[in-house]
Image: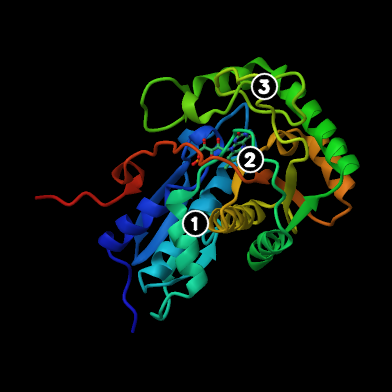
Amino acid sequence: MTTGFTVQQLRAAVSDAVRAPSLHNTQPWRFRLRDGGIELSVDPRRRLPATDPSGWGARLACGAALFNLRLALAVAGTPATVRLRPYPAEPDVLARLTPDLPRRPTPTEQSLHAAIRRRFSNRAPFWPDPVPADARWQLGEAARAEQCWLELVIGTGAVNAFAEIARSAHRVLERDPAYVAERTAWIRSEPCPDGVPVAAGGPRSEPQDLLPQRGFGGRNRAPGRDFEPEPLVAVLGSAGNTATDQVVAGQALQRVLLTATDVGLSVSLLSQPIEVPGAREALRLSLGRFGTPQMVMRIGYGQPGVATPRRPVDEVLDLPVVSA
Ligand SMILES: Cc1cc2nc3c(=O)[nH]c(=O)nc-3n(C[C@H](O)[C@H](O)[C@H](O)COP(=O)(O)O)c2cc1C
């Protein structure tokens, strides 16, 4: 019979889980052991009320952390069975992982796990080199393996139409003082275990930019260092848009991001058109797909990205207090 996970296994897996991306690097997750299972909850204290009033972004980030957790446990030879939102009375508990039969990790699990610590959001301009067909196919397969879809926005007309939707969403958000205050509050110019360091924030936007860049206090760029003229834009979508669908989408997002890292690609995330309901609907209609867009990615080849910090593992664990 398989016994439960240990605190040691929990700690090791969580140190990988927390490398997941999150809105403004808020790291909105908590982990605990309960009856031998590892449970992942969204941390309501780390929600962004102005940027993410519905909690969509926090659930996506937790889904991404869940994918890392699954990989870490599988690579350690202790794979897990996952139940999403296992307790109707506790909606913040997003997943419960219990030990599955031990087995060797697959080569895919090993390479995706190895990519966890090499993945960073890369907001700098990419090189003009196109993303080859086999890499595009692998990214689509990564989304499909996690019950989601990935639609590549191909052709100048389609990219321009997408950019128009994204820029208008960006303008709507930037007109909201609460959103701007929140974004500004998470920019870090001093070392800090959360938030977006200025060095990772990418260059400052310029009027000629096709895609809107969320401002994280980046530097002015050198003349001529414009963004790639034909970015590869990919939209990740899920079948529905329940809280559970968003956790599923977060896992698919992380699988796509790690697959991209594994094949040498860089990615930056662009969620303004997801955050503004009218823009999200316009995006959905422009793709002509069933389901709901959950994230937009800009994908290409570039200089390595800049790592962002994480809180120590102990700060995100809820462990029973053991009296001496
Ligand atoms: C739901 C979600 C939405 C995000 N939206 C954006 C965005 O619009 N623009 C951006 O530059 N980064 C965005 N990010 C990336 C985060 O800022 C980034 O993950 C975080 O700062 C941690 O850095 P890392 O990805 O390099 O680990 C988003 C991340 C998540 C999970």
For marks 1 and 3, give the CA distance: 33 Å
| Residue drawn at the location 26% of the way across and 60% of the way down | 8
The residue labelled by disc 3 is 205
Disc 2 residue crowd, few under 14, some 14–19, many 20+, Cα 10 Å:
many
Labels 2 and 1 touching (C-beta < 8 A) = no
For marks 2 and 1, give the CA distance: 19 Å
Residue 212 in the image, given as x and y percentages of width and height: 72, 28
Q: Amino acid at mark 3?
A: Ser
Q: Amino acid at mark 2?
A: Leu
Q: Nearer the viewer, residue 50 or 271?
A: 271
Q: Nearer the viewer, mark 1 or mark 3?
A: 3
Q: Nearer the viewer, residue 56 or 156?
A: 156
Q: Quadrant of residue 182?
A: top right
SS label for mark 2: strand
Left or right of 308, for residue 4: left
The residue labelled by disc 1 is 66
| Residue drawn at the location 37% of the way across and 32% of the way down | 193
Q: Quadrant of residue 203?
A: top right
Q: Quadrant of the N terminus?
A: bottom left
- The answer to whether the residue bearing label 2 lies less than 8 angstroms from the nearest atom of ligand 1 is yes
SS label for mark 3: loop
Q: Is residue 105 above or below residue 47?
A: below
Q: How many marks?
A: 3
Residue 102 in the image, given as x and y percentages of width and height: 38, 80
Disc 1 residue crowd, few under 14, some 14–19, many 20+, Cα 10 Å:
many
Q: Quadrant of residue 6?
A: bottom left
